[in-house]
Amino acid sequence: MAGIKLFSEYLVIPFLFLFLSTLFVVTSLNVSTLCIKEERLTLLKIKKNLKDASNCLSSWVGEDCCYWKGIECDNQTGHVLKLHLRYSQICSTTNKLPLGGKISPSLTDLKHLSHLDLSDNDFEGITIPKFIGSLNMLRYLDLSNANFAGMVPTHLGNLSNLLYLDISIAFSSLWIIDVSWLSALSSLQYLHMGSVNISSASYEFFRALSMMPSLVELQLPNCKLVTLPPSLPFENFTSLSVLDLSGNYFNSSTPSWLFNMSNLIDIDLTFSSLRGPLPVLGRGNLCKLQRLLLSNNDLIGDITQMLETLSSCSNQSLKLLELNSNHLTGKLLHSVGLFNSLHDLELSGNSLSGPIPASIGNLSNLVYLDLEGNMMNGKIPKSIGQLTKLQLLNLLENNWEGTMTNIHFHNLTNIVGFSVSSKTNSFIFNVTQDWIPPFKSLHYVEIRDCQVGPTFPNWLNNQVFLLKIILRNAKISGEIPRWLYSMSSQIRQLDLSHNKISGYLPIELNFCSTLSSIVNLAFNQLKGSIPLWSGLTVLNLRNNLLSGIVPVNIGQEMSGLRFLDLSNKHLNGSIPLSINKIQKLVYVDLSNNYLRGEIPVFWTGLQNLQTIDLSNNNFSGGIPASICSLPSLFILELSKNNLSVDLSFVFQNCTTLRTLSLGNNRFFGSLPNEITKNLPSLSELLFRGNRLSGSIPEELCRLPFLHLLDLAENNISGSLPTCLGDVHGFKLPQTNFAYLPHPTIFYDSLTYRRHIELTLKGRIIDYLSRMLVYSAIDLSNNHLSGEIPVELAELIHLGAMNLSWNKLTGHIPDNIGSLKDLESLDLSHNRLLGPIPPSMASMTFLSYLNLSYNNLSGQIPIANQFGTFNDPSVYAGNPYLCGDPLPIDCSSLLHGNGEEEKDGADEDDEKIERLGLYASIAVGYITAFWLVFGSLLLKRSWRNAQFKFVFDMRDKLLVLIAVNLARAKRRFGLERI
């Protein structure tokens, strides 16, 4: 038996060998014959039409096309099933050029093709080929980010077997007009059309979607959709799990159907112009939801109901909740601690109130917590220290109280970034001086507007990966610690501004030239000279005790600067010409120093320069004409110097200039000639306190962006142009004018800190960065005459108007009440007359009014804002005004409804008439007297005749008296007496 068994085993071996050999041969034969010759030739035709500059298709050689890169064949038939030509799949490295050229119509010869991927290539703006619609076996089509352009062909609707369609693109170079073809794709499960312009068929598009009940994923970001239907027939639309409508222009409320699809796991509606209340969520509707993104909209309402509904799900699946940058209110309740799967909680930029609930410590998976820019208060709970996975903690811009200590960081071993500040300035960040943090990978820290000092936080010395240190307004004093010197080579941003740091500015700081670092040490008490730190992009040393000159070689040593602020110091000397070597410089501020001499042409190499601020120095002479050669100059601030030149002939072709501030110099002449042609973009014209003369040209009214006009304290004469009522910039709401009239913002903590001095509400207001500026007109202290044009009342959003100390006459326009947004009005020291227009009572925003020293009359209005103007000086110098707050009682005049003013006027007219009557009588008497008396003097015969006539008349009169007297005696019996 053993022998037989051994024999049988030996007998099996040859048969096994024969079987395996046969299998190998068969397999080899199958492999060698997989590629079908006709389809291989078709692929070579496709390759011939493509541009392959990087030779990414180098493997497309030989007989067996099924082994070529990007090709996948059927294992049984050898037909080409899949064509993967995505750039990242066929090109091994990212520095190679993608495919381009054209797509050969021979593609339709691949009759069995079910998968076509041409994504992430560059087809140079050609249209999507219509013949792709003939590939009726396609189930997967990806043409995303391949630089196709033009109208999406409706022929794609022929692909009735399609399950996946992606034609998304980074830029909107594709568009759809007719969307009816989408209805034919009834089997489609994945539809991605990001940045395809569907604006002309927005409503029809959503109707087409209702015919696609199999959709699982719908991504339509940045498609310029403008219609979000309030309802849709989505009864069968139950399979949708991903919905992305972000970046569109719906400008509507959030329809309820968006949140009635129970299978949704991902909703993205960020930047979609949604407004109105938060959607009301039904309990159990969104229990599968993992990502809810509604940030950057105009949603309002209490967040509490939404959080309560989401937390009621038994299976807590929510991982990401983004509601930031809306107008939401409410509080974070204890139920927040139920979201135990939550990774990201982003609620910044709202109006949430109340404290952080202690249950926040239950979110064991939380990685990112962002509560910046709310109204939250109370103490920060110590339970935050239990979030062991937390990496980013942002608690900036709230109203925190109490103290934050070591305990708050007890288990935060993974923290990478930490930010906190308090608007109450009562918050204390108090850790012990010998504290060693549990985290070792901190990359950035931002603590501001709270107490950290008085000593510099020594615990930062243990952080070896720090790239960003912001300790602004942290009540830190003393000198900069020496351990920071050695760390400076890795620092990308160092902001120690608004403290009381003293000592000499350490020149030992060594910033790496490749990091383009930001250094902000403004508003401290540092001494010494200006340092030359190479490798900086931003240097802000404003308001310190530095002295000396601006280094002559600053341009060579700091050639990478983009932002330079050396203002409010004790610098003297002149501006070094080497600044023109800082070719990327965008902003330079040397204001509030003692710099002198003429302004040199230091900008010849600075083609990026946008802002020049040299105000409040001792510069003299004129303004170099070449300043208008700067192609991007937005702001020119030269006020408070000793500059003197005829402004009529400067600023030729300053086409980009938006702010021109030349106040308090000695400029003369008239306003710049052809101002619309030479300064077409001007929005702020500030010429206060010079020697300008002439009139206000009507051409000024053709500056469409003008919203600040300050020509006060000059010698300007003439009348107010009626066309001022047509200036578009004065008609825009104040919110349209952020302080910066251009997008020059330097990083998250440093912006252009300029000052505009406007005399508003009877005082000088210094507007700083990011403050809203009034739309304002100030023409005070000039020699303007004539009436106030009624057209000025058309500037309905004007914020301030000052016409005081001129020679204006006539009435205050009756329609002045149309200036609904006016907050400051000064018409004092003119020659205005008549009543205060009743329409002024409707100016409910008016908080400052001065009508003193005119000839106004009648009763002072008492409605609305006039009840707050209880200072008699507002109306002083108008003897015919009456009523509160003046001591003149209107009840003593007739009817108290304005008739006393009329009677007073009638009385004045009667006096004038009586005076005229007396004057005419006197003139008549004198004339008659001299006609008679003069003639008697000149002619004797007339005198004799006149005297004879008088004597004859005397005799006749005596005889007549005697006769009448005798008759009377006889009548009364008196003749015997």
Image (cartoon, rainbow, N blue to C red):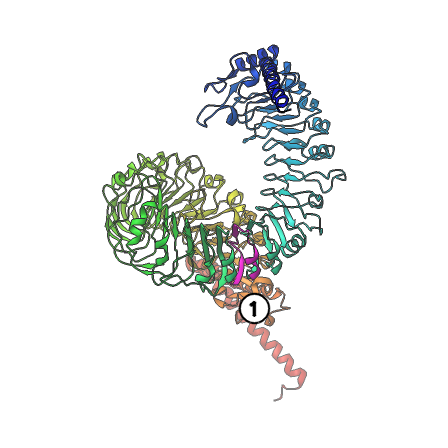
Give the amino acid at mark 1: Gly
Viewport quadrant of the C terminus: bottom right
Look at the picture and state if 82 lies above or below 956.
above
The residue to which callout 1 is attached is 883
**Residue 48 visible in the shown view:** yes
Q: Residue 691's x, y, as percent?
A: 34, 48
- The residue lying toward the viewer, choosing from 613 and 324, is 324
Look at the picture and state if 902 lies above or below 209.
below
Magenta stretch holds residue 359: yes
Does residue 249 appear left or right of residue 807 in this picture? right
* Residue stretch rendered in magenta on the structure: 358-380
Residue at the image point whose x is 59% and y is 30% from the top: 168
Magenta stretch holds residue 132: no
- The residue lying toward the viewer, choosing from 555 and 502, is 502
Q: Residues within 10 Å of mark 1 (few under 14, many from 20)?
A: some
Res 195 quadrant in image: top right
Res 681 quadrant in image: top left
- The residue lying toward the viewer, choosing from 499 and 673, is 499
- The residue lying toward the viewer, choosing from 466 and 662, is 466
Q: Residue 198's x, y, as percent?
A: 64, 31
Look at the picture and state if 274 lies above or below 49.
below
Viewport quadrant of the N terminus: top right
**Residue 380 visible in the shown view:** no
Q: Residue 873's x, y, as percent?
A: 47, 66
Does residue 649 appear left or right of residue 310 in this picture? left
Q: Residue furthest bottom?
A: 977
